[in-house]
Image (tube, rainbow, N blue to C red):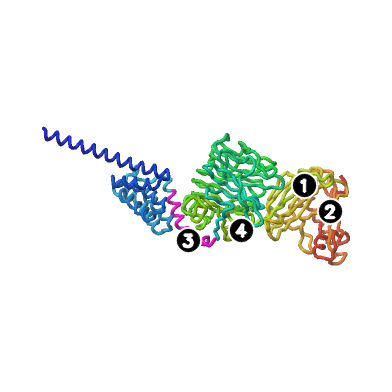
């Protein structure tokens, strides 16, 4: 009886000691993780080693140790820890993914694929318990992305490793964190976020004769005692605006889009973009297009593909529209963030952890097609993307340099902003811009008019709004029609065919609109014919429909359509050719419903030159189509 009691007592004592030992091991493990989360890596490493000594079979302890070694960049011990994590619990499927992902980040691609092959085999192992050991559905998605990333990385030829990556220097960077770079289209101001004592504020630097001047605290009321970040700057013909993110400060959701306007070189008080644009969820990281009429931003609102998606709002008649999702080509089930729409209007850069990449968030590029669809995103590859989060990518209007933040070695401290030279396949189109205003020719006062810029090759409307001033990006090699129309005024028609894009020499436009009156003449600068022919070319459709709008808005107006040539060729031939060209316009307008009695076609040949015929430039201006108001 006494012997039996002693055996029971010894057994209970052993269980009690075992429980106490387990508790101590767990306490050490918990302390290690808490120290790791607090950034106290040496303390965390000391505690986790004690925890492992206490319980050498605790796979979770090895997983924590692996994460600590990864963080302090001790790859040899990180790999040993990952292997011990798997050895102590061969059935826990997710451990193989974490090991494979670390090997991938170290560019050990074949070993990473081997670890993923083991991941696939785990469910066939003896004693595998699906409810306990199987990876989650979201983990399976990460595995698919990792496999695609490995294949992409193995094919990467390393083009981006040749980029000229340069720190922007002490004018911009400091021992603190600098990130979220941006500029207006003219490239004369650099705007970024700096973190000072855990406080985010905007800083600006001006371009001087010798490069960037020393960055200074953004002037005005844009910075507050709270955090401001992720800017996008629009410097238009009249207004200068900055769009940015403000969180937990009286908005419609956790983070909202705000803007401030510059006046007298100072940023004014911030204004919420309103409930049409913002939602009850997280809305942040705006990027405004070069013409100021589109904003692409990241949002966690419902109705997307999952996680954070990219959305777009447009300004129509001065008001921002309800945002639309950019769709499944751009957005994934995970997160898409930090968009930047280039000034060319078609090239989008953004960060994603849902498309195949090199690390957590990578930078991707997509182009907008003529049919309005986005191309499959391309990863910008090594050199830009790393094994960590890479976000906040900006490309200047010249399409030569990009800017981004990185904590790579050799900086001034923390995150620094770097410039990088893009290779051709990742370059947007370089842009110039039209900088214009609409003025009453008689009073010289600004007037609001419907301004429209159309790419005549594609018939795509580049810009259309009722404005008195405008800034519109344009690309070299395109043929543009610019129309300005206002009620009671004759239309202003212009043509632009930029041969090169130099951002420092914009096209300055002053559209002088005249009140409609009898005998008023306007030259149609976007009517095109082949040499010595009178068949209207397709590029003429935009101009013809604009004339149709003028006649429709003034139903009693009668016009003369006059054709003119240079002095090349015989007088008889020139008069006949000019008459046939004028008649071609008349017949086109009649087919669109304009009564024949309202239209008179006449050819003047070379009898009414606008310029001298002694030069090719002069002869080109003399070959023209005009309309003259006969009566109202």
In this rendering, the label closer to the viewer, 3 or 2: 3
Per the image, the residue denoted by label 1 is: 438
Per the image, the residue denoted by label 4 is: 400
Give the image quarter of residue 478.
bottom right
Q: Earlier in the sequence, mark 4 or mark 3?
A: 3
Of 485 and 7, nearer the camera is: 7
Q: Earlier in the sequence, mark 2 or mark 4?
A: 4
Of 127 and 34, nearer the camera is: 34
Q: Is 580 situated above or below 50?
A: below
Circle 4 SS class: loop
Q: Which residue lies at the image location 80% right of the left edge and 56% below the top edge?
A: 584
Per the image, the residue denoted by label 2 is: 561
Q: Earlier in the sequence, mark 1 or mark 2?
A: 1
Per the image, the residue denoted by label 3 is: 155
The picture places residue 458, in percent across and down from the top left corner, at 68, 55
For the record, the magenta segment spans 141-163
């Amino acid at each position: 009886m006494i012997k039996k009691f002693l055996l029971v007592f010894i057994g209970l004592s052993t269980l009690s000691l075992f429980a106490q030992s387990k508790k101590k091991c767990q306490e050490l493990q918990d302390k290690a993780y808490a120290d790791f989360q607090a950034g106290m890596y040496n303390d965390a490493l000391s505690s986790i080693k004690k925890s492992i000594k206490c319980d050498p079979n605790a796979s979770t302890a090895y997983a924590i140790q692996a994460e600590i070694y990864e963080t302090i960049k001790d790859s040899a011990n990180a790999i040993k820890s990952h292997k011990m994590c798997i050895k102590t619990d061969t059935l826990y499927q997710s451990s193989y993914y974490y090991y494979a992902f670390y090997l991938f980040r170290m560019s050990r691609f074949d070993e990473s694929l081997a670890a993923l092959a083991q991941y696939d085999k785990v469910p066939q192992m003896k004693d595998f318990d699906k409810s306990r050991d199987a990876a989650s559905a979201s983990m399976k998605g990460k595995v698919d992305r990792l496999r695609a990333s490995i294949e992409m990385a193995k094919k990467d030829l390393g083009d981006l490793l040749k980029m000229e990556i340069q720190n922007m220097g002490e004018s911009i960077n400091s021992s603190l964190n600098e990130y979220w770079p941006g500029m207006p289209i003219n490239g004369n101001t650099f705007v970024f976020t700096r973190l000072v004592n855990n406080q985010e504020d905007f800083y600006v630097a001006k371009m001087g004769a010798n490069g960037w001047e020393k960055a200074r605290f953004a002037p005005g009321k844009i910075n507050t005692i709270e955090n401001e970040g992720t800017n996008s700057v629009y410097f238009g013909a009249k207004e200068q605006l900055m769009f940015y993110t403000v969180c937990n400060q009286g908005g419609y959701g956790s983070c909202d889009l705000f803007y401030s306007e510059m006046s007298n070189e100072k940023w004014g008080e911030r204004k919420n973009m309103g409930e049409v644009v913002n939602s009850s969820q997280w809305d942040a990281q705006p990027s405004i297009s070069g013409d100021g009429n589109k904003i692409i931003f990241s949002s966690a609102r419902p109705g997307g593909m999952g996680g954070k998606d990219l959305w777009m709002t447009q300004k129509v008649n001065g008001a921002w529209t309800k945002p639309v999702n950019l769709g499944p080509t751009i957005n994934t089930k995970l997160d898409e963030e930090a968009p930047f729409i280039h000034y060319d209007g078609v090239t989008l850069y953004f960060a994603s952890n849902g498309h195949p990449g090199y690390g957590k968030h990578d930078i991707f590029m997509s182009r907008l097609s003529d049919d309005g669809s986005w191309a499959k995103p391309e990863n910008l590859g090594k050199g830009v993307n790393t094994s960590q989060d890479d976000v906040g990518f900006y490309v200047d209007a010249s399409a030569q340099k990009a800017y981004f933040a990185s904590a790579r070695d050799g900086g001034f401290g923390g995150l620094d902003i770097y410039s990088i030279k893009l290779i051709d396949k990742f370059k947007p189109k370089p842009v110039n811009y039209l900088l214009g205003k609409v003025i009453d020719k008689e009073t010289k006062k600004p007037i609001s008019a419907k301004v429209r810029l159309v790419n005549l090759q594609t018939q795509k409307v580049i810009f259309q709004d009722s404005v008195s001033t405008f800034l519109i990006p344009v690309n070299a090699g395109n043929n543009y029609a610019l129309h300005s129309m206002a009620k009671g005024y004759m239309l202003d028609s212009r043509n632009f065919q930029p041969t090169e894009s130099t951002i420092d020499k914009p096209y300055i436009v002053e559209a002088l609109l005249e009140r409609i009156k009898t005998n008023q003449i306007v030259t149609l600068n976007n009517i095109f014919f082949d040499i010595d022919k009178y068949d209207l070319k397709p590029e003429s459709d935009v101009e013809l429909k604009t004339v149709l709008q003028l006649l429709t808005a003034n139903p009693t107006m009668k016009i003369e359509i006059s054709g003119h040539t240079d002095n090349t060729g015989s007088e008889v031939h020139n008069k006949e050719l000019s008459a046939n060209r004028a008649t071609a316009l008349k017949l086109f307008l009649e087919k669109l419903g304009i009564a024949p009695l309202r239209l008179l076609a006449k050819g003047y040949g070379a009898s009414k030159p606008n310029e001298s015929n002694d030069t090719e430039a002069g002869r080109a201006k003399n070959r023209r189509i005009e309309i003259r108001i006969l009566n109202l």
